[in-house]
Amino acid sequence: MILLTEEPLNPDDAVRAVMTHTDGAYVQFVGVVRSHARGRTVTALEYQAYVPMAEAQMRRIAEQARERWGLACSILHRFGYIPVGEAAVVVCVASAHRAEAFDACRWVIDTVKAEVPIWKKEFANDGTYWIEGEEALPASAS
Amino acid sequence: MTIHVLLFGHYRDAAPSEAEGGAFPVTLADGATVADLAKQLAAQEPRLADLLVRTRIAVRAEFAAPETILQEGDEVAFLPPMSGG
């Protein structure tokens, strides 16, 4: 299951999409907007996506996980304005055994962060910042 | 030829005021490359001077190199370091 949406994510959808009766485990990662980052108080994040390319990259990463570990993988990412406490990303992999499920889930979320064209704008107590990799760059007011 | 440019992250704040969603057209000579496009953008807007240093490039939504020769109607996206998740 690959989903890039402005609507709230339902982590259970990601599980249902991958689990079969031959799977003995699933590992799920849910990334949630938190209230602090880089020493600042954060009120919300706004995710910007290059939608067609982001969807293609998410599909590609799921395909690579299937080739490498032979398992099904759900990747859900929300974009637009997301308040603190709500999920921004969900990854779920199902497997016969836990070891490869942990490995694959970790690899998928790490690869999503580095290879899917999505960026976050952070609304903080002292201003608004674009987060680009490890850098936080002041954003113009909007 | 006309190329459609897409800017993301803080570069979108430097897009021409008429750009909607960070997208705007640029006219280039036939045979121009992505690097030529970046040079032209940098000449028009100093905040875009480091595009080739800081961004990855996508042509028609696929990763591409700066020396890629552009075709009429291509969509060129400059992708700063990603921060999804």
Image: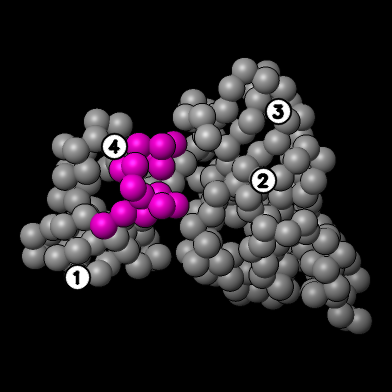
Measured Cα–Cα span from mark 1 to mark 2: 35 Å
Whether residue B57 is visible: no
User: Are tags 1 and 2 found on a single chain?
Assistant: no
Identify which amino acid the numbered label 1 is placed on.
Answer: Glu
Identify which amino acid the numbered label 3 is placed on.
Answer: Val
Q: Using the image, determine if residue A10 lies above or below residue A124.
A: below
Q: Is residue A28 in the magenta section?
A: no
- The residue identified by callout 1 is B72
> Which type of secondary structure does the marked residue at label 3 adopt?
strand
Q: How is the image coloured?
A: one colour
- The residue identified by callout 3 is A42
Identify which amino acid the numbered label 2 is placed on.
Answer: Tyr
Between label 4 and label 2, give the one nearer the viewer: 2
Q: Using the image, determine if residue B40 lies above or below residue A141.
A: below
Label 4 crowd bin: few (<14), some (14–19), many (20+), radius 10 Å: many
Q: Earlier in the sequence, mark 3 or mark 2?
A: 3
* Residue drawn 17% across the image and 43% down it: B39
> Which type of secondary structure does the marked residue at label 2 adopt?
strand
* Residue drawn 51% across the image and 29% down it: A141
Q: Position of residue A89 (x, y in %)?
A: 71, 53
Label 1 crowd bin: few (<14), some (14–19), many (20+), radius 10 Å: some
* Residue drawn 85% across the image and 73% down it: A16
Left or right, B48 with respect to B32, comes to right
Q: Which mark is residue B48?
A: 4
Boundaries of the magenta span: B10-25
> Which type of secondary structure does the marked residue at label 1 adopt?
loop
Measured Cα–Cα span from mark 3 to mark 2: 13 Å
Q: Position of residue A34 (x, y in %)?
A: 76, 34
- The residue identified by callout 2 is A81
User: Are tags 3 and 1 found on a single chain?
Assistant: no
Tell me the subunit letter for badge 1. Answer: B
